Amino acid sequence: MAAIIKLIYLGAAVCFILGLKRLSHPATARSGNILASIGMLVAIVATLFDQQILTFPMIIAGVVVGSAVGATFARTVKMTAMPQMVALLNGFGGGASALVAGAEFLRFQAGVAAPIDVAITIQLSVLIGSVTFSGSLIAFGKLQELVTGRAVTYPLQKTLNAILFAAVVGIIVWLVVSAQPVPFMVLVGLALVLGVLSVIPIGGADMPVVISLLNSYSGIAAAMTGFVINNSGLIISGALVGASGLILTRIMCKAMNRSLVNVLFGAFGSGATEVAAGPAGALERPIKQITAEDAGTLLAFARQVVFVPGYGLAVAQAQHVVRELADLLEKKGVDVKYAIHPVAGRMPGHMNVLLAEADVPYDKLYDMDQINPEFERTDVSVVIGANDVVNPAARNTPESPLYGMPILDVDNSHHIIVMKRSMRPGFAGVGNELFYDAKTTILFGDAKDSLKQLAAEVKEL
């Protein structure tokens, strides 16, 4: 029986790896997700049968209820709320790992003492799982606007966090030497507080980094829990999630010009509250507006048009309309491309997923390094809800919190059309110099309605 279970875990691992591979391309992402899900289902059922934890009716009931909840979320959660959903799932994963490790701690306490390596792994799993749980709830609150999206700072913040972390390490050492319930509960409480304090000082502009990091934490906690309960399936799946999350975090950090150490110690994101919003007098500077009729004419007679999507596109649910407009332009011989910044939106890959939903061809999506040289040859760039990722202050204004962050060089285009509801700043809370560029015109209104108007104008030309 043990050999069969190990073979099942091996098969599940193959499903995970092949699923991840297929997730790397939109054309195969859906089948990759299904394949990885099947692998996880098989691994869970095999574990329950092997350990005889539950009866057959309870296993079936759990699968049915869990599948129903998951299917409901998948069908009802809007694309704009997907980052919040990802944050919650990260938290649930970390919380589950902490609970399993906690149960093992109580089991060893009631019987034979745990070996030192198992004892250390239990405490680390509880620590990382609890930090992931509470940190993910705060991330969810920020994204859902239940908690302020701005960075929350306080005096001696780094010092207090360091003291708290040192106390956590001390308690872990104590528990390894002498497993006692009271210090264990203190560890759980301090870990939950540490998770809150790690995420609360991070502003909304940095949420893509936070989400990818918490995703990695949940995987690491799961892998450690797998070592605790000697479950190879959990070790493999947790290691894959942890490693992929760290790689993604590194990519996000590079895209935001932040170091991984800076992210790990929660020292970033507070600068947005300390710097004035853009250059002095920016709010009084004049802007140029454009009508849908003029914008449609400009697009229809362009040679190359680049769409730059941002969170505003997701809010307006305008991905299908932008695809329709792009199709109309291409019929007129216009070369259409999409510029994707790694941290556009509120989670890694947000814009890729959004445009894939509208069946935008993947070969028309260009990352920052690919598209930046193209802007000099671009007749019209259309910025749809993007803000911080196109702000020239990242290059030109040393006192800006965005300074040094790689951006899309939209300001090099011949003409720039910015679609906005208002002149409110982006997540970083700073004014956007692009809006006042001599080549920039603003098309105010809901992005979906504005794109529909543009499509209608292009049809008539």
Image: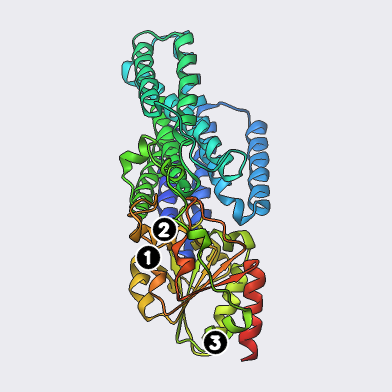
Residue plotted at (37% across, 71% down): 371
Vertical placement of 182 versus 198: above or below?
above
Mark 1 secondary-structure assignment: helix
Residue 276 visible? The answer is: yes
Label 3, label 2: how far apart the Cα atoms are = 29 Å
Residue of label 2: 342
Q: Tell how many labels.
A: 3
Q: Nearer the viewer, residue 74 or 386?
A: 386
Category of crowding for the residue at label 1, using alpha-carbon neighbours closer than 10 angstroms: few (below 14), some (14–19), many (at least 20): some
Label 2, label 1: how far apart the Cα atoms are = 7 Å
Amino acid type of the residue that numbered disc 2 sits on in the rendered structure: Pro
Find out whether the residues at labels 1 and 3 contact each other: C-beta distance under 8 Å.
no
- Which image quarter is the N terminus in? top left
First along the sequence among labels 3 and 2 = 3
Amino acid type of the residue that numbered disc 1 sits on in the rendered structure: Met
Residue 4 visible? The answer is: no
Q: Position of residue 68 (x, y in %)?
A: 68, 45
Mark 3 secondary-structure assignment: helix
First along the sequence among labels 1 and 3 = 3
Q: Position of residue 403 (x, y in %)?
A: 35, 54
Residue of label 3: 300
Category of crowding for the residue at label 2, using alpha-carbon neighbours closer than 10 angstroms: few (below 14), some (14–19), many (at least 20): many
Q: Nearer the viewer, residue 261 or 323?
A: 261
Q: In this rendering, would 284 be left or right of 367?
A: right
- Which image quarter is the C terminus in? bottom right
Residue of label 1: 368
Residue plotted at (49% across, 47% down): 39
Q: Which mark's residue is nearer the viewer, 1 or 3? A: 3
Amino acid type of the residue that numbered disc 3 sits on in the rendered structure: Ala
Label 1, label 3: how far apart the Cα atoms are = 25 Å
